[in-house]
Each structure stands twice: as C-alpha cells, then as structure tokens.
Amino acid sequence: MEQQDKLINIYLASLIPISAIAIGWALQNDPLRNLDGGFIALGLLTIFSACWLRIQLPRTNVHLTLSDALTILSMLLYGGSITILLALAEVAAGAINLRLRGTELRWKTMAINVLAAPIGVFAAYHTAIFLFGPLDQVVARNDFTSLIWLLLTITITLFAINSAIVSIFAAIKTKKSIWFHWKANLLDAAVMNVLGGLMAGVILKAVTQLNLYIVAATVGFFGVIFLTFRHFVSDARRSAEIAHREQQERYELAEKHVVELEHYVAELEKTADALQKSHEKFRHAAYHDALTGLPNRNFFIERLKELLLEGAEAGEFKFAILLIDLYRFKTINESLGHSVGDRLITNVGVRLSEMVRESDMAARFSGDKFGIILTDLLEKEEAAAFANRLSARISEPYMLDDRQVFTDVRVGIAFGNSKYAEAEDLLRDADIAMYYAKDSNEKHVIFDQKMHVRAVTRLQLETDLRYAIERHEFELHYQPIVALETARLVGFEALVRWNHPQRGLVPPNEFIPISESTGLIIPMTVQILESACKQVKEWQLRYPSAVPLSIAVNISGKHFADPGLVSQIKNVLAISGFEPSSLKLELTESAIMENAERAIQMLTQIKEIGVQLSIDDFGTGYSSLSYLHRFPIDLLKVDRSFVSAMEENSENGEIVRTVIALAKALRLNVVAEGIESIHQFHQLRILKCEYGQGYLFSKPQSVADIEALLADEGHWQHFLPQAPRPVPAAANISPLRLAN
Ligand code: C2E
Ligand code: MG
Ligand code: MG
C-alpha cells in the first residue's frame, strides 16, 4: 500500500509542473483582456452548471453537464488563457461543492482533477491553434465544416488528455490496467464530451448571430428546463431504484420461498421415506416369524396360492409341501427351559433354511411347527428323499448352554394337484399326514385320501365326545387286582369304555387321545373318578374285608398338568365319601417326567390328601432313576410286555426281577400287569411281586359280572400250589372261561 501511495505522490508531483506551466502560460497571456459582461455570465453559468447542473443518467456512467460545452465555448470566444483559469475554477468549484454536500472525495482525487483541467485546456487550445490557426478567425469565417472539425479536435484532445491523466491515476491506485479504467469509467464520458463539443458549436452559432445576453437568457431558460428535467430524471432514478429494490426483495422472497419449498419437499420426502420404511417393516412383521426371521404361515399360504395358480395355468403341479413337527420338543422346552427351547427353534430354523433352494421356502408356523415348500420336483420320490435328508440333518446334536440337545422331526408330506382349490386344503392334508407320522412314530408320512376319511371320522368322534360327557355315555369296566401271595381280590382298576349310540362299546385307545387333545379328558376323568369311587364304596359296604377294596383310576398326562386336579380329587372324595387311602391314581412315566420338578410338587399335594400313587406301564417310558426316589409314590405297575415275555425269554424275566428289586429298594409295592398264564403267576409269586392283574384272573368286566365274582370268595384259590380246588358257586364264572 505504501508503495502505491508513493507512486501516486510521484505521479501528482510530476503533474504539478505541467499544470503550473499551463496556468503560468495563461496568466502571462493577459487573460483578462477580453473580459466583458458576456464572459462573466458565461463563467458563472459554467461554475453553476458544474455544481448543480450535473445529472447522472439512470443505470449509466454518463454525467450530463453543460460545463464542458461552456468551457469550449469560452475557448472559442475568449481565448485559451482565460479558459484555462475558468476550467480551473470550474473543477475546483465542482469539487468543493461535492464536499460541501457531504460526498466522500479524497484530496488526491480532487487534486488530480484540478491538475488535469488546465493541462487539458492548454493542450486542446494549442492543438487547435496548431491545426486551424487563430480560433477567432475560424469562428469569424463562418465555415460550418471547419468549425465542426475544430470542435472535434478540441473535444477529443480535451477528453484524451483528461481521461489519460485520470486513468493513469486510477490504474496506479488499483493496480489494474489503464485500459481497464478507461473502458469502465470513461468510455461513456467520451460520448458526452463529443456531444458537449457539438453543443458548444450550436451555442456559438447562436452567439455570433444573436446577442450574447439573449443567449444567456435562453441558456438560463434552458437551465430551468434542465433543472426540471434533472428533477424528473432523479425522480425516475428513485422510482427505478425503488422498483429495483422491490424486484430485489421479490427476488429474495422468491429465493426464500424456494429454499422453504425445498425444505418442505425434503421433509415430505423424508416422511414418505419413513412411511415406506415403516410400511416395509410392518409388511415384514406381518409375513415373518419374529424368533427365527423365517417367513410365517401367512407368507407360506401366499406362496402356496401362487403355486396353485401357476400349476392350474400350466396344467401341471410340480411342488410338495412338508409340515414338520419337532419330536419331543415339549419335553426339551419344559425340562431345559424356554430360552433353550427358543434357541433350539432358532437353530432348527437355520438348518432348514440352509437346506432349501431359493425357489423353495422354509417357514415357521408356530411353536415347534415348520413348513417347507419344495418346487420344481421331477419325481414325487424327491420329496420323501428330502424328508430323509431333513431328518438326518435336524437330528444332529445342537450345542445349547454347553450341553448337547437332540431332536428329530415328524414330517407330513402333501403334493400340489388340481383338486386343491384352496391353499388351506393342501395345508390341512399335510397336517393330517404329519399327525399320522406322529401317531405311527414314523419320520415322514405322505398324505393319501384314506387318511382324510379317517381324519373326518376323528373329527366326528370329537364332536360326539362332547355329547358323551353331557349324556354320561361312559361305562366303567373293572379289572380285578389280586394279591399274588393269597390269590385274593384286593381291588380293581377302573377302565373306561364309551357306549357310543351307533358304534357300541368303543375302546379307550380310540378316544382317550382325542379327549386329551381337546381337553375333554378332564371332565371325563372327573366323571370316571366319581362313579368308580361311588361304585367301589358300595362294594366295600356290601363285601366287607379286613383291608377294604381299593380302586385304581388312570390319570392322563394332560390332566396331571392341570392345576385343578387336586381340588377335583378332594371334591370327588367328599361327594362319594370314599376313603382316600383306598384310591390309587395311575400315572405314566412320561406324564411325570415331562416336568419332574413340578410333578414332585403335584404328587406331594395328592399324597397329602391320603390317596395312593402308582406308576403305570413301568419300564416302557423313560424314567430317570435319580428322580424315581424323589417321587412320593406307592406302587410300580410292571408293564404287560415284560410279564408276557417272561416265559419265552429269560432276559425279560430278568427285567421283571430287576424292576421288583428296584421297587423293593425304593420300598414300593409292585403290581404285575397282563398275567395271562399260571406259569407267570407262579414266577411272580417266587419273585415276591405283591399284586397282579390279567386275563388269568379276569378281563375288565361290567359291574354285574364283577358282582358275581365278588360273591365267590375263594375264586382263584386253586391257582395256589397244592391248594384244594374250591367248589364253584352257582352264578360263578369259571376263570378258565374268562381267560379265553
Ligand atoms: P392300562 O392302564 O395299562 O390298562 C391296562 C390295559 O391292559 C387295559 O386295556 C386292559 O384291558 C389290558 N389288559 C389287562 N390285562 C391284560 C392281559 O392279561 N392281556 C392283555 N392283552 N391285556 C390286558 P384297556 O382297557 O383297553 O385300556 C387301555 C389303556 O387305556 C389303559 O392302559 C389306560 O392307559 C387307558 N385307559 C383306560 N381307561 C382309562 C381311563 O379311565 N382314564 C385314562 N386316562 N386312561 C384310561
Ligand atoms: Mg392303568
Ligand atoms: Mg398299564
């Protein structure tokens, strides 16, 4: 910056002597020689116009002023010397005026203008004289062409010198080129200068032909018009500025609106995006299982519908569905806890999805139920082969909580075909096949139409069973239980039969599973308990003995899981007035083992009532010996399969022997089931088995038949070794006949 200041100072200093020469020349050449009233008027007008008759044309850099024209006029009429002084006065007055009006004007800028003015006039005057000779002569010649050339010469020289001086000054100040400043600030002024020159010519013409005072008056008149015009122009400029500002404001407002609009659109897009995402999330949740992330039943059915439609269009069905149930999942879930159960399900889900192709589908329906769709099947056998691979893969051990857990599958398979109008029908058939697999303990079963018939029958049975309870269609048969030591009757096992109005007596294995799955087993058992207790109570009264007759009633696993069982037992005992110690409840191993800890609590509560407890079919289930001693039980009932095999195979004889030894160790009594031969009877007596039941003694019989038997006290005495055969009573039934 300092460098530039220095340069400017040098520049100004170098202009001072040149300007001084011009002024000096002017002063030496008797400037006042032609001074008259006309010049004073011209001079005042020039200064006045420099100060007040200056207007900038709107949106241009052009300043309209009369002073340039008046300066040239002065040069032509009164000579160069006085015009130099006039120019000096005009520029100085203009600058002072600007400063007085508060316009920021640097001293150096003012100085450059003041210095340039005399130099410009000096140069223009001498160039004109040099080219055209004395100027008053050119004016006097009244030759229009040479006057025009003269004016042009003066104008251009004036302009060239002035603009050059100012542009150099500006170039030093801003470090930009001289041409840049000339072009930016002075080009417009060039036009005005030429116009000013021409105007001077016009005024000159008027002055030479009219009187100077008239001209001054005319100029004054035009000055007034000019002022009015200036007022008008400044008005126009103001309104243009207002318009410009308003436009600017509108533009800014519009810009603000655009920004707001963009923001709004972005917000809208965000909302739409979020909506889309939540929609997708919702859709995903609606069609997927939360635990495994696999497709759910809804998704499965949707896909199935598509496949049925495609099949119907193509005229061929090349897909199968597999419904999968995890084997013994419930036991795992209840014994190892639900979190292990959940992880097992998740792991199974992973294995299943690894086994299927992209076009197939593995889905989880609920609990331990999964479904698979196999597409593009060439042969039906492929589905069965897949089920085998599936079983092999799923039965590989799972490491959960540092322990190995095993499971397997039961699979029902159904193939797509044109008979299926609804996806649900296909699913129902696969489901039927799956239940067959579970019932028959096969790994997979392919659906066939016969199963459907049986399923319908089962459904019918289910409906009938509800009525059976209302109508008391159950009938109890009683199978005697005999003390093997004495061959005397000690009690009965109550075995239910359903007296179906159309089908006659239905055996328990046909309806117990249905009643278990429908929950009807509970009201049914309550009825059985009540009528058995009432019946045996009556027999106890009619046939008194040292130890009152006992009654054993079977309790299903489903019922055992019901917390209401204890109060139901109490209730029945109260209603029937039956001695609790004569009631024996039979439970299977699996019913107790399903949830051993809970079983202990339940058994304890039942024991507190005074009722006795037996484990039925002992040896066929899966008993944990570590638990066995913790169960508050009284009796073990050795399963018929071991008893019946005693003769054929000494190994099975061993089993019975071991069970009896175990029972003794646990201080339990043993009942042998299914004694059919006298040999078995003898062997069991030798093994010190306390009790027995079986066809050898009696089949389960109706109340009437049992009453006949009760009347015959020494009925089985002849089975005892060396015991004399008793004489049968009249209504007695031969045990040999019964055994048939
Ligand atoms: P269970 O409790 O083990 O009953 C013994 C079954 O073996 C009875 O079959 C009986 O008729 C049969 N049985 C007895 N001795 C012999 C024999 O020497 N040879 C042969 N071959 N069979 C013999 P049932 O009456 O058909 O009952 C079958 C099963 O149904 C019962 O097995 C029991 O688990 C269940 N059940 C029967 N009645 C009821 C009941 O009222 N409630 C519940 N929950 N289950 C019952
Ligand atoms: Mg039983
Ligand atoms: Mg049994």
Image: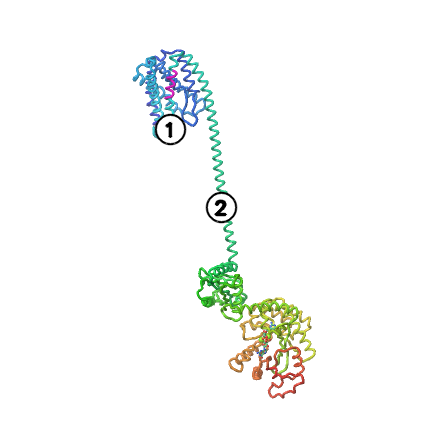
Label 2, on which residue?
A: 269
Residue 165, above or below 533? above
Q: Position of residue 382 (x, y in %)?
A: 45, 66
Q: Which mark is residue 247?
A: none
Q: Is the shortest distance between ligand 1 and the CB of mark 1 under 8 Å?
A: no
Magenta span of residues: 194-203
Q: Position of residue 667 (x, y in %)?
A: 58, 77
* Lateral position of residue 466 relative to residue 139, left or right: right
Looking at the rendering, in which quadrant would you find the N terminus?
top left
Task: Say what secondary structure mark 2 lies in.
Answer: helix
Category of crowding for the residue at label 1, using alpha-carbon neighbours closer than 10 angstroms: few (below 14), some (14–19), many (at least 20) = few
Q: Amino acid at mark 2?
A: Glu
Residue 1, above or below 336? above
Q: Which of 542/169 is in front? A: 542
Q: Position of residue 603 (x, y in %)?
A: 60, 70
Residue 560 visible here: no
| Ligand 3 falls in quadrant | bottom right
Residue 110, above or below 590? above
Looking at the rendering, in which quadrant would you find the C terminus?
bottom right
